Image (cartoon, rainbow, N blue to C red):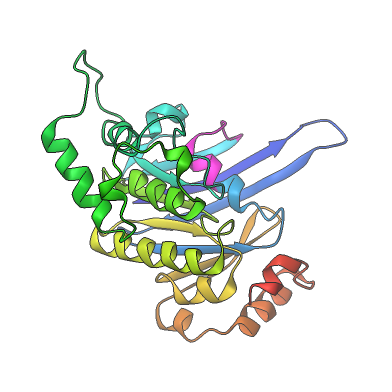
Amino acid sequence: MLEARNIVKTFNVGTVNEKKALQGVNLTLADGDFVTVIGGNGAGKSTFLNAISGVWPVDSGQIIIEGKDITGFPEHKRAAFLGRVFQDPMTGTAADMGIEENLALAFRRGARRTLRSGITSSERALYKDTLSRLGLGLQSRMTTKVGLLSGGQRQALTLLMATLKQPKLLLLDEHTAALDPKTAKKVLELTEEIVEDQHLTALMVTHNMKDAIRIGNRLIMMHEGRIIYDVAGEEKKALHVQDLLQKFEEASGGGFANDRMMLAE
């Protein structure tokens, strides 16, 4: 479903602030893989997701989704293949538009634009049914402006929008980090349910090691722009947080210097 071949990205080339963010990242995901991504600050996790989604061009390498080379595609053209949820609940939705209007934008993403306006009754029924699965009562507030929702409600809506058209690849960039623990748990449960029900292929960056071990069928660890550890299946299920800390020290030659990650054990 995804092939990232020798992805390289350097920022501020030739200056004192030069930063080699990605140093030859290679990753292949099979259809239906749910991969959690961990690593310290500056490891390249979000940079890698930005490379896949086309936020900026990579220096070299190839990004291939379902056999199609999208390396040269601009970000808006990749929208037909990808769904993405960011850390900030305020990102990914239009605050001044209603819930159903936001869902309509997501439903028509990547589709050809026409002069037809408004939301059809069949679309509205689909959105209502989809919202009801959240268990947040949003199906009875279809015209409510999204800016009036809580952070958790907004993030849950963003997740629905990202998966409404069953993307080839779902990118989750610490999408529960800004939520309180109870809401984060709800959004994570919803994430697992959607990924499983729709048989999506997903990459989820997280700072929580326990979540990284528990969720998905595969885990990768990044450090200084490289993937230094890749584990799947039964071996992943048997992991403990201390195992990950040890693996990091072995692969990187140093300690896991990330207070937020350590606190998330």
Q: In the shown orientation, is residue 223 left or right of residue 219?
A: right
Viewer-nearest residue: 132 or 243: 132
Q: Residue at x 28, y 45 (%)?
A: 164
Q: Is residue 121 above or below residue 260?
A: above
Which residue occupies the foreground of this view, 120 or 21?
120
> Is 52 covered by the magenta stretch?
yes
Q: In the picture shown, does residue 78 fall above or below 171? A: above
Residue 73 can be seen, yes or no: no
Q: Is residue 28 above or below residue 241?
A: above
Residue at 56% across, 47% down:
88
Q: Quadrant of the C terminus?
A: bottom right
Residue farthest along the top direction in this orientation: 115
Question: Measuring 33% from the left and 49% from the top, which residue is drawn there?
Answer: 160
Task: Let me know if residue 153 appears in the view.
Answer: yes
**What span is colored magenta in the figure?**
49-59
Q: As rendered, which of 212 and 238 lies closer to the eye?
A: 212
Farthest left residue in view: 122
Quadrant for residue 257, please give it: bottom right
Q: Position of residue 50 (x, y in %)?
A: 55, 41
Q: Is residue 55 left or right of residue 217?
A: right
Residue 182 part of the magenta-drawn span: no
How far from the left and from the top, in percent, is residue 77? 38, 28
Q: What is the count of numbered marks?
A: 0
Q: Residue at x 36, y 63 (%)?
A: 190
Point out residue 95 in the picture as x, y percentages from the top left corner: 47, 34
Figure quadrant of residue 195: bottom left
What is the x, y in percent for residue 75? Answer: 46, 30
